[in-house]
Image: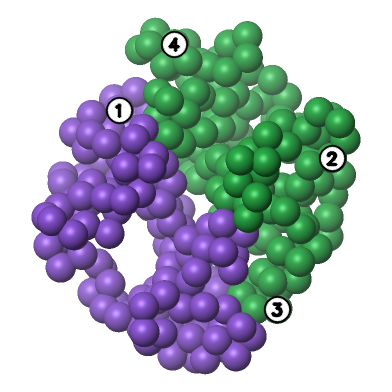
Chain colours: A green, B purple
């Protein structure tokens, strides 16, 4: 069912510093910051030859990563995203097997404009997993 | 400098259950468990179309992931690994820019039989980064 690893998302306490570090110290291909007000984050995309890293920084009052950064002030890996061909089929299969889909259990439109869902980290080895339909 | 994302390593509290979950619930291509006694882990490789997931479980008395699982009993993402062409050049560049290489600062032979080094997570947004020469 799961396909490519679409991205690894890393929450960072200082987006400018983290972007500069990936560009200069690690020598990666780093894009400009992009505000995603509907998702409460500012994102910097790092393009690797085979996948992406997304640096996330809180935007606005109710950012979904504010609590994570409070608990992890140095930052940390927030989630990983696997691609699926059919998100509705994935949701049905997962819930049938007892996995918990976060929120009301239905896919939403994610930061890339595609349908996504998030799986409960307690059901997946402490890892927050996003599934994105591609 | 950094190239492909070689793998994402996830420490898991129950390797059999985690491997079965990736194979059955997530429908991924999951290999058999492989003991790596020199590195204190048993590993299950999950092959995605563009990269790998490595499920890690402690092996032996002084496993480097035992402490991580004590702190994170449900498991969690332990590290991510970027490929580099020249690990000695990478080590020099990183230490010159003030990043800390774990251990004595020199590359070691990693679990894939290739030279690796690990960077201090406090220097990289709370993320343990492995660099592997390919």
Name the front one of labels 2 and 3. Answer: 2
Q: Which chain's residue wears label 1?
A: B
How busy is the neighbourhood of tag 2: few (under 14 within 10 Å), some, or many (20 plus)? some
Are dots 4 and 3 on a single chain?
yes
Q: Which chain's residue wears label 3?
A: A
Secondary element at image label 3: helix
- Name the one closer to the observer, B76 or A50: B76
Earlier in the chain: of badge 2 and badge 3, it is: 3
Q: Which chain's residue wears label 2?
A: A
Q: Note whether B110 is above or below A8 in the view shown.
A: below
**Percent x, y of residue B2:** 55, 74
Q: Name which residue lies at 65% across and 78% down.
A: A25
Residue labelled with disc 4: A95
Q: Is residue A104 left or right of residue B46?
A: right
Q: Note whether A40 is above or below B96 in the view shown.
A: above
Name the front one of labels 2 and 4. Answer: 2
Q: Name which residue lies at 56% across and 64% down.
A: B122
Mark 2 → mark 3, Cα distance in angstroms:
25 Å
How busy is the neighbourhood of tag 3: few (under 14 within 10 Å), some, or many (20 plus)? some
Residue labelled with disc 1: B21
Residue labelled with disc 2: A59
Are dots 2 and 4 on a single chain?
yes
Name the front one of labels 4 and 3. Answer: 3
């Amino acid at each position: 069912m799961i396909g490519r690893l679409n991205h690894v998302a890393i929450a960072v306490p200082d987006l400018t510093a983290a972007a500069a570090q990936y560009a200069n110290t690690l020598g990666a291909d780093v894009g400009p910051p992009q505000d995603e007000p509907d998702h409460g984050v500012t994102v910097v995309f790092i393009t690797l030859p085979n996948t992406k890293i997304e640096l996330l920084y809180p935007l606005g009052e109710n950012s979904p990563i504010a609590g994570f950064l409070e608990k992890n002030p140095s930052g940390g890996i927030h989630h990983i995203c696997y691609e699926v061909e059919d998100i509705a089929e994935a949701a049905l299969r997962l819930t049938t097997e007892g996995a918990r889909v976060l929120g009301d259990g239905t896919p939403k439109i994610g930061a890339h404009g595609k349908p996504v869902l998030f799986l409960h980290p307690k059901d997946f080895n402490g890892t927050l997993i996003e599934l994105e339909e591609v």
